[in-house]
Amino acid sequence: MVDSRPGRGDRQGRPGGSRGGDRPRSGGGSSSGGSGGERRGARGGERAQGGRPADERRQQGTGGRGGKTGGKPGGNRSQGRRPQSGGDRPWRDRPGREGREDRTADQKIYDGPDIPDDISAKDLDKHARQALQGLPEKLAERVSRHLVMAGLLMASDPETAYLHALAAKARANRNALIREACGETAYAAGKYSEALAEFRAAKRLSGQQMYAPMMADCERALRRPEKALAYDTPDVRKTLDDAGNIELSIVVAGARRDLGQVEAAIRLLETEPLSSASRAPWVARLRYAYADTLLAAGRRDEAVEWFHRTVAVDGDKATDAEERVAELE
């Protein structure tokens, strides 16, 4: 659904800056396309009423003055039970309950932004739909439409994309696909603490390490490069596919630069296939990161060469390599 490709980092590749080229894309098989609303998921599932706010649950008969059971939630006058202390006072007015304003805020998150009528659950990638199969049909349909919108708005309006992902989470918060969507949209919106928390939740639910590159990059964005380095372990590396390993190397090299270890960053990037004939998106990001790191090391001529080699494979202009060449020449 959502696209976490690099492209908005600074000259060292840190997310949120003005220069692009080495923000990571999650590896290990997680694929997302912001323009088409496609996502891959993991396992998941949620109860039909998963994250419904209290107001809606009461309307469905789980308690409250208008519910089938009557009285306070949990009470049942038809079975002769006395309501708990507070009598017939509305439960929202009793001490210890959240106020109307708090519930309204929760309801807004649950409702989420409007979804155009022409957006269908079928627009979601089939792998993502499979990840939602544990949800009741109507709930899965609503969640799917929010995920589609999150993907469509990822690049142009990441804040609203994030709100769509949160609406899906409010309905089914124990689904790895949905938590991943929240992480990716938060990441795109520059909400790195929130993104890190969501990726951690997705990892717990799915048991997969594919989020490691983006989690490490969130640590960089939060000015914790040492924690970013902690993701570079043999156990993590062996679970990532080739693209995921390269993305992790790009992030780790950036963390080395954050720590002033420029030569170490260069050596790490040189272990990756810089001269690959592949046209995969990671090639441009890898070359850009290498060129930028060479420049940081004072190796200007080599940097210009590698910025040119980045332009040669960056047909989608995911990086600003052309601008960098113009500046340097």
Image: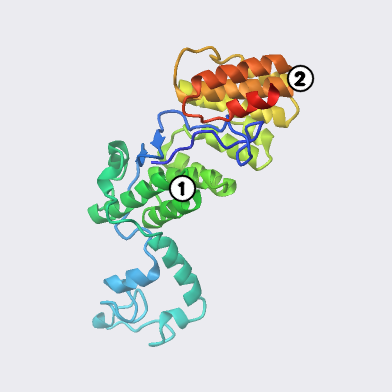
The crowding category of the residue bearing disc 1, from other C-alpha atoms within 10 Å (few below 14, some 14 to 19, many at least 20), is many
Q: How many marks?
A: 2
Determine whether, in the image, residue 195 is placed left or right of residue 87.
Answer: right
Residue shown at the point (32%, 60%) measured from the top left: 49
Q: Is residue 122 visible?
A: yes
Residue shown at the point (74%, 20%) measured from the top left: 297
Residue shown at the point (57%, 46%) measured from the top left: 190
Where does the image place residue 250, in percent across and percent down from the top left? 59, 26
Determine whether, in the image, residue 266 is placed left or right of residue 130.
Answer: right
Judging from the image, what secondary structure is the residue with disc 2 in?
loop
Q: Amino acid at mark 1?
A: Cys
User: Quarter-wise, where is residue 44 in the image?
Assistant: top left
User: Quarter-wise, where is residue 88 in the image?
Assistant: bottom left
Q: Say whether marks 2 and 1 touch (CB < 8 Å).
A: no
Distance (Cα) linking label 2 and label 1: 39 Å
Determine whether, in the image, residue 271 is placed left or right of residue 183.
Answer: right
Q: Quadrant of the N terminus?
A: top left
Residue shown at the point (25%, 45%) measured from the top left: 122
Q: Earlier in the sequence, mark 2 or mark 1?
A: 1
Which sits in the foreground, 152 or 272? 152
Q: Nearer the viewer, mark 2 or mark 1?
A: 2
Q: Is residue 133 above or below residue 263?
A: below
Q: Quadrant of the C terminus?
A: top right
Judging from the image, what secondary structure is the residue with disc 1 in?
helix
Which sits in the foreground, 263 or 324? 324
Which of the numbered marks, if any, corresponds to residue 298? 2
Q: Amino acid at mark 2?
A: Gly
Reading the image, the residue beneath label 1 is 182
Q: Is residue 98 visible?
A: no
Determine whether, in the image, residue 310 is placed left or right of residue 62.
Answer: right
Where does the image place residue 284, in percent across and percent down from the top left? 53, 23
Which sits in the foreground, 215 or 157? 157
